[in-house]
Image (cartoon, rainbow, N blue to C red):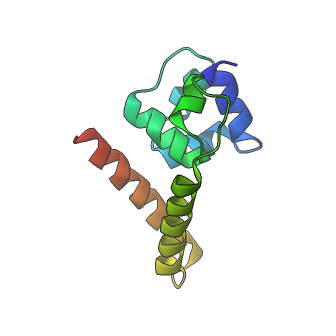
Amino acid sequence: MTLGNKLKQLRGKRTQGEIANQLNISRPTYSHLETNRIEPSMSLLTAIADLYCVTTDYLLGRSQDSRLTEAEDKKTAEMASRFAELVSDLPENEQENAWKQALMYVQFTKTQK
């Protein structure tokens, strides 16, 4: 299965625009990823894997097992829980903005390495 096919499958019923916004890329860029017209950078590939809670090896076809290891899964769940707790008293639209800002920060940090 190609990367594009995996992305379509993982996206499910969400729109390309919704996923593109979460990844801080344009909808046409995400569309090109799904149609295998372009390949993602390593930082974008990592962001996609994080978004869908799968490994980069799964996305790249190096593994048929999409699941994170138990330790990775536990760490991700703990961080998500802490973040949700921090923003829980904010209005819903501000919670969404906080999530987007966190994603942008992570992506920026990854590009600085």
> Which of the 4 image quadrants contains residue 52?
top right
Horizontal and vertical percent position of residue 51: 55, 47
Residue in the foreground of this view, choosing between 110 and 91: 110
Residue 25 in sight here: no
Residue sticking out furthest to the left: 112
Marker count (numbered): 0
Name the residue rendered at 67%, 29% in the picture. Answer: 64
Is 82 on the left or on the right of 15, as rendered? left
Residue 91 drawn above or below residue 47: below
Residue 105 drawn above or below residue 81: above
Name the residue rendered at 69%, 40% in the picture. Answer: 11
- Quarter holding the C terminus? top left
- Quarter holding the N terminus? top right
Name the residue rendered at 48%, 66% in the picture. Answer: 79
Name the residue rendered at 40%, 59% in the picture. Answer: 101
Is 86 on the left or on the right of 10, as rendered? left
Residue sticking out furthest to the front: 70
Residue sticking out furthest to the bottom: 89
Residue 64 in sight here: yes
Residue 103 drawn above or below residue 49: below
Residue sticking out furthest to the top: 37
Horizontal and vertical percent position of residue 42: 39, 30
Horizontal and vertical percent position of residue 69: 57, 48
Residue in the foreground of this view, choosing between 29 and 50: 50
Horizontal and vertical percent position of residue 63: 61, 28
